[in-house]
Amino acid sequence: MATVDIRMFADQNEGTESFVGVWLKKPGERVMENDPIVEISTDKVSMEVPSPASGLLKEILKPEGEPAAPGEVLGRIETEHGETAGAIEDGLSPAVRRLLQQHGLDLNDVTRTITGTGRGGRITHEDVTAYLARTQPVSETKPLSRMVPHTAMRRSIAAHMLRSVQTAPHVTAVFEADLSRVLAHREQFRTGRGESVPSVTAYLIAAAAKALQAVPEVNSRWHEEALEIFEDANIGIGTATENGGLIVPVLKRAQTMALTDIASKLRELTERARRGTLTAGDLEGGTFTISNHGVSGSLTAAPIILANGQAAILGAGKLQKRPLAIELDGRDAIQVRPMMYVTLTVDHRALDAQQTNAFMTKFVDTLEKWS
């Protein structure tokens, strides 16, 4: 027998902080060479470290949540020749073993009865579920259900979100924006400019960049000894992927970009995100984030701040026509306007109501007075 080190990637961009996200195996469990064994998280992207050899995971040297330096040893694998007595059980995933235990299934019976459809003939969670459907009677009192194993991205997102709310005290301010001027400006692109029409999200990015310049404390990161305020507005946009995950590509130096440039870059990043062709560089360096949850129908929400230390995240709800009380020629009147609820969730260690409301006032004012 021999041991093989599981090492962190040797190459890492300068200034990028990496940490151990989720161990996909526990000590004593069998692993196969090149199978994912541990996730490494950096900003909002997670990367899987493949197993360097087949054998048993002997020990974990870097627990979940700890920082990982380039080339650092994360754990060790004990290699073996031939199968051990527990080889069959070691080859089952934790989810499969739990399912067997929940239903009182004998391991030897299962391996003789079920034909595995996984890699190398392994028995998968779906194999056991199908077996149960064929062999066990339906309970009249217990509701039917099925277990859907978490993807690596979902586990990484869960770890990020949990760490963020455990670290930063979250406070959310809610404002409302009239987007009449924005929609009128978009109509000009349709009718006369011969250019691609910027999305509403592009306008949100442009307005946020102006607000970050007006209230730079929002474009910051909390440190125990000081507040780090960034010169550039590197704005990340939460983007849903087809497999149900979420990634955050970043528009670098948005404060220097014209609206048409923002719209063009946003289209490029969104298309590449959905094709799965973004690079690590596209996801790094964010200083502020926008979550346009309204595109999926949500009216308002209080998104969770990214766990990489940003001080705030902006939420944009569904654009919806609503009656609005206004003053017209000195008299109160009701008009139907395209309205949007917008929120700013802040790390209360870094920002108070004064900076939060000043940012949102500038953000909304920029949208409502667009020309």
Image (cartoon, grey):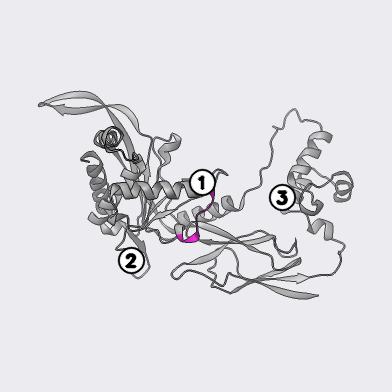
- What residue sits right under mark 2 in the picture? 228
Please provide percent x and percent y for residue 126: 74, 43
Which amino acid type corresponds to the residue marked 2 in the rendered image? Glu
Tell me the quadrant of the picture where the C terminus can be found: top left
Whether residue 246 appears in this view of the structure is yes
Where on the picture, by quarter, is residue 89?
A: bottom right
Q: Residue at x 26, y 50 (%)?
A: 359
Which type of secondary structure does the marked residue at label 3 adopt?
helix
Judging by the rendered image, the residue that carries numbered circle 1 is 274
Q: Indicate which disc, 3 or 1, sits on the residue closer to the N terminus.
A: 3
Q: Is residue 258 magenta?
A: no
- Along the viewing direction, whichever of 317 and 180 lies nearer the viewer: 180
Cα separation between marks 3 and 1? 29 Å
Q: On the picture, is 128 further left or further right than 154?
A: right
Magenta segment boundaries in residue numbering? 275-281
Residue farthest to the bottom, as pictured: 2
Viewer-side label of 3, 1: 1
Is residue 290 at least partly visible in the picture?
A: no
Disc 2 to disc 1, how far (Cα)? 32 Å
- Name the element at disc 1: helix
Q: Looking at the picture, how far across and down is residue 311, in whole percent?
A: 36, 57
> Disc 2 to disc 3, how far (Cα)?
43 Å
